Image (cartoon, grey):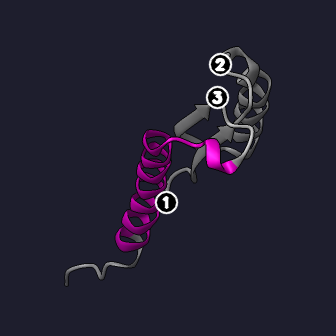
Amino acid sequence: MGKKKAVFLTAMADEDQKTASGANASFDLMADYLGWEIVGRLNVGGCSTADDLRKKDLTAAYKLALQALFFIVETFCCCTRPTPQ
């Protein structure tokens, strides 16, 4: 069936993307250990509260979620499709 797919989303107050490097590294190690395939990552800076999220950030997160959902549906459909006789 293949590897499980994973996306990683972070929101942080700091604008510097290097701030997410520790979280990204931890996620990479966990995904590797569990045998997951990382299909997307989004690190958004400048967000002290949920109201600080910009429309473009929410749109990017939504697209990643759709991408992950597509992989789940595609995997399910491929595994449950009847074989031709």
Return the x and y of residue 75 as percentages of the image width and height. Answer: 42, 64
Q: Is residue 81 shown in magenta?
A: no
Determine which residue is flagged by label 3: 45
Dominant secondary-structure state across the stretch colored magenta: helix
Q: Residue at x 51, y 41 (%)?
A: 54
Tag 1: amino acid: Met
Task: Work out whether mark 2 precedes mark 1 in sequence or the reverse, and give the earlier one.
Answer: 1
CA gap, disc 2 and disc 1:
34 Å
Q: Residues within 10 Å of mark 2 (few under 14, many from 20)?
A: few
Q: Nearer the viewer, residue 82 or 29?
A: 29
Q: Is residue 61 magenta?
A: yes
Residue located 73% across and 23% down the image: 14
State the separation of the CA atoms marked 3 and 2: 7 Å
Quarter of the figure with residue 74: bottom left
- Label 1, on which residue? 1
Q: Is residue 31 above or below residue 62?
A: above
- Specify start and end residues of the magenta stretch as a single range: 50-78
Contact (Cβ within 8 Å) of mark 1 with mark 3 = no
| Residue 36 in view of the camera | no
Q: Is residue 25 visible?
A: yes
Disc on the earlier residue, 1 or 3 = 1
Q: Is residue 68 above or below residue 9?
A: below
Q: Which residue matches tag 2? A: 17
Q: Three-letter amino acid code at disc 2? A: Gln
